[in-house]
Image (cartoon, rainbow, N blue to C red):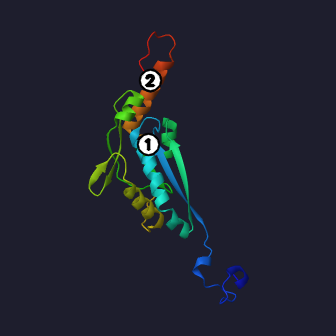
Amino acid sequence: MNKSNCGCSSCGSGCCCAGNIETETRQVVVDFLYLDLSVCEWCQGTEKNLEEAIASISNVLELAGIEVVLNKINVNTEELAVKHKFVASPTIRVNGRDIQMEVKERPCDSCGELCGDEVDCRVWVYKGQEYSIPPTALIVEGLLRSIFGHEDVKDEDSEYVLPENLKKFYTAIKNKNQCCSDKTKNSCCC
């Protein structure tokens, strides 16, 4: 950069002004995988807190030359679950890696109402406590650790098996939809 580009009268051919350093932008892909945003309070709260977390660190990411690409993926079929190796709802991944590797679940009334059967959804562990909706601070820490951390990432080449809990959910949804679309019945079970 020369002084005509920099605006600094003391610079020659190499600019020393930190504010004018151009950085190469790199993309970081954040996937938000969920079963439902219309009914499930846990998924809705996670979406809200994820958006807040990304907004709260946006200046840092911009200064580091990092662009976040947020993908919201409604994993509403077994086929999509297999495609995305979905293990629990909701899930947040950075460049394909879950921000919280340990998966714990509890019964979720919202998803139970949605599918008509008892179903478990993910709970998040933060500072020794379990949360049905991950605190924004947990998400911020997970994002920053995943983006800037230099931990060894092990290839997860193990064969994916759809968890029983998700099988139960998808089967219940299919049954409920089939029941409600069956025109030969006088009353619907929905």
Quadrant of image for the N terminus: bottom right
Q: Position of residue 65 (x, y in %)?
A: 57, 68
Circle 1: is it few (<14), some (14-19), or many (20+) Cα within 10 Å?
some
Q: Nearer the viewer, residue 80 or 24?
A: 24
Task: Say which residue appears at 51% left-offset and 62% top-offset.
Answer: 58
**Residue wearing tag 2:** 176
- Location of residue 90 with respect to 17 vertically, above or below: above
Residue 31 in view (yes/no): yes
Is 173 left or right of 132, judged from the image as shown? Answer: right
Left or right: 90 as drawn, with respect to 5? left
Q: Residue at x 60, y 72 (%)?
A: 23
Looking at the image, residue 12 lies above or below residue 43: below
Task: Tell me the mark number nearer the camera, choosing from 1 and 2.
Answer: 1
Q: Position of residue 32 (x, y in %)?
A: 48, 48
- Residue 166: give x, y in percent of width and height: 41, 37
Query: In the displayed structure, would residue 181 be above or below residue 113?
Result: above
